[in-house]
C-alpha cells in the first residue's frame, strides 16, 4: 500500500519511471543480504529467508515454506531439492520466474480468478510482491 501511495504521490505512470522508482525504494524495503552477489569469493553478509523448494512441485513447496517466513522483506536464498547451486542471485531469480511466469499463471490466472482457490491468494500476492521488489522479469503479469 505504501509503495502504491508513493507511486501515486509522484504521479508516476510511465513503466520505465515506475521501474526506476521501485529500484530506488528497493534500498529502503529489502532487508538483509544484497540481492545479487558480484564476487562469489566475497559473499556479502546479511540475513536471508532461506527456503528449499522442489522444482517439480514448486507451488506447494514454496507456499509451505512461506508458512514459516515472518519477514518477506528479507532477501530470499533459494535451494532447489536435489540440485547443487550456491544462491548468489541466480537460483532466486529462477525460482521467482518459475513461480510467476509458469506455475502461478497456469493455476491461478489462466482461466480467470477462481473462487475455490481464494484462501491461497494471500501467498500469490506475497509472491507477486517479492517478484516486483526483487526486480525479476515477470512479463506474464507485469507489462
Image (cartoon, rainbow, N blue to C red):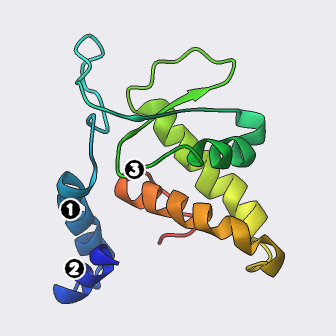
Q: Residues within 10 Å of mark 3 (few under 14, many from 20)?
A: few
- Element type at mark 1: helix
Sequence-wise, the earlier of marks 1 and 3 is 1
- In this view, 92 is above or below 106: above
Determine contact: label 2, label 1, CB under 8 Å: yes
Task: Pick whichever, 35 or 74, lies toward us.
Answer: 74
Residue for badge 1: 25
Q: From mark 2 to mark 1, how far is it between C-alphas?
A: 10 Å
Determine contact: label 1, label 3, CB under 8 Å: no
Residue for badge 3: 71
Residue shown at the point (37%, 34%) measured from the top left = 48
Residue shown at the point (25%, 26%) measured from the top left = 38
Classify residue 68 by image quadrant.
Answer: top right
Task: Tell me if 107 is positioned left or right of 98 in this view.
Answer: right
- In this view, 104 is above or below 32: below
Determine contact: label 2, label 3, CB under 8 Å: no
Residue shown at the point (77%, 63%) measured from the top left = 107
Q: From mark 1 to mark 3, how far is it between C-alphas?
A: 17 Å
Q: Residues within 10 Å of mark 2 (few under 14, many from 20)?
A: some
Q: Residues within 10 Å of mark 1 (few under 14, many from 20)?
A: some
Residue for badge 2: 6
Classify residue 25 by image quadrant.
Answer: bottom left
Classify residue 3 by image quadrant.
Answer: bottom left
Residue shown at the point (56%, 69%) measured from the top left = 141
Task: Tell me if 112 is positioned left or right of 137 in this view.
Answer: right
**Foreground tag (1 vs 3):** 3
Q: Can you give x and y, in whole percent of width and height, for residue 4 in the image?
A: 32, 80
- Element type at mark 3: loop
- In this view, 102 is above or below 109: above
Amino acid at each position: 500500500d505504501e509503495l502504491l501511495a508513493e507511486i501515486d504521490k509522484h504521479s508516476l505512470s510511465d513503466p520505465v519511471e515506475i521501474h526506476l522508482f521501485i529500484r530506488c525504494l528497493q534500498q529502503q524495503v529489502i532487508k538483509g543480504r544484497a540481492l545479487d552477489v558480484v564476487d562469489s569469493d566475497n559473499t556479502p553478509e546479511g540475513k536471508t529467508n532461506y527456503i528449499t523448494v522442489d522444482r517439480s512441485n514448486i507451488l506447494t513447496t514454496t507456499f509451505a515454506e512461506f508458512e514459516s517466513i515472518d519477514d518477506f522483506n528479507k532477501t530470499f536464498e533459494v535451494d532447489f531439492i536435489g540440485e547443487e547451486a550456491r544462491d548468489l542471485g541466480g537460483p532466486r531469480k529462477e525460482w521467482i520466474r518459475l513461480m510467476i511466469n509458469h506455475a502461478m499463471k497456469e493455476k491461478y490466472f489462466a482461466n480467470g480468478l477462481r473462487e475455490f482457490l481464494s484462501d491461497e491468494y494471500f501467498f500469490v500476492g506475497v509472491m507477486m510482491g517479492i517478484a516486483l521488489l526483487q526486480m525479476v522479469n515477470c512479463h506474464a503479469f507485469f507489462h
